Image (tube, rainbow, N blue to C red):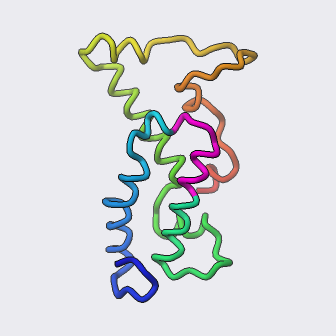
Amino acid sequence: MLGRKCKLYRRNERTIYKICIRTVLTYASPVVAHTALKALDRHRVIQNKFLKEATVAHWCVRNSILHRDLELPTIAKFMKDASKRFFDIAGSHPNALLHSSVDYEPPHRHHFIRRPRNVLTDPPDALRVAV
């Protein structure tokens, strides 16, 4: 349905991406968003391949231009936003265990073990700022 010879409008292809493909890529994103960058890169590659094929973009078109034109965030930004929303909702949840998972102090800067919520406070890199 989303190949190069498909006759769908761009808006419909974008909707199919958001409903079908992005939901599969971002399943359990509060957990996956805090994994190694290599795992997020695999998701980013899948997203960019889909966007290039769905829009019939030439190989030299930048991915940031595709994201801007289709008004879609990068998959890493979407996962981090979803994770932030999850932790915001978990903070006001009546379940004590879920509420306690939100309240903790982040480790010191010299600490080598990173807790999941630290990713939300990381400074954005150049690609995320551009998109």
The residue lying furthest to the right in this view is 110
In the rendered image, residue 9 lying in the magenta stretch gets the answer no
In the rendered image, residue 39 lying in the magenta stretch gets the answer yes
Percent x, y of residue 127: 66, 53
By secondary structure, the bulk of the magenta-drawn segment is best described as: helix
Q: Is residue 36 left or right of residue 11?
A: right
Count of numbered circles in the view: 0
In the displayed structure, 72 sits above or below 14; it is: above
The residue sitting at 43% across, 40% down in the picture is 29
Percent x, y of residue 44: 56, 56
Q: Is residue 130 left or right of residue 3?
A: right
Image quadrant in which the C terminus is located: bottom right
In the displayed structure, 46 sits above or below 97; it is: below
Percent x, y of residue 98: 33, 17
The residue sitting at 64% across, 78% down in the picture is 59
The residue sitting at 33% across, 12% down in the picture is 97
What is the span of residues highlighted in magenta in the rendered image?
Answer: 33-44
Image quadrant in which the N terminus is located: bottom left
Q: Nearer the viewer, residue 91 or 53?
A: 53
Q: Is residue 46 left or right of residue 102?
A: right
The residue lying furthest to the left in this view is 94
The residue sitting at 63% across, 32% down in the picture is 122
Q: Quadrant of residue 99?
A: top left
In the displayed structure, 55 sits above or below 38; it is: below
In the displayed structure, 11 sits above or below 107; it is: below
Percent x, y of residue 111: 71, 15
Q: Quadrant of residue 30?
A: top left
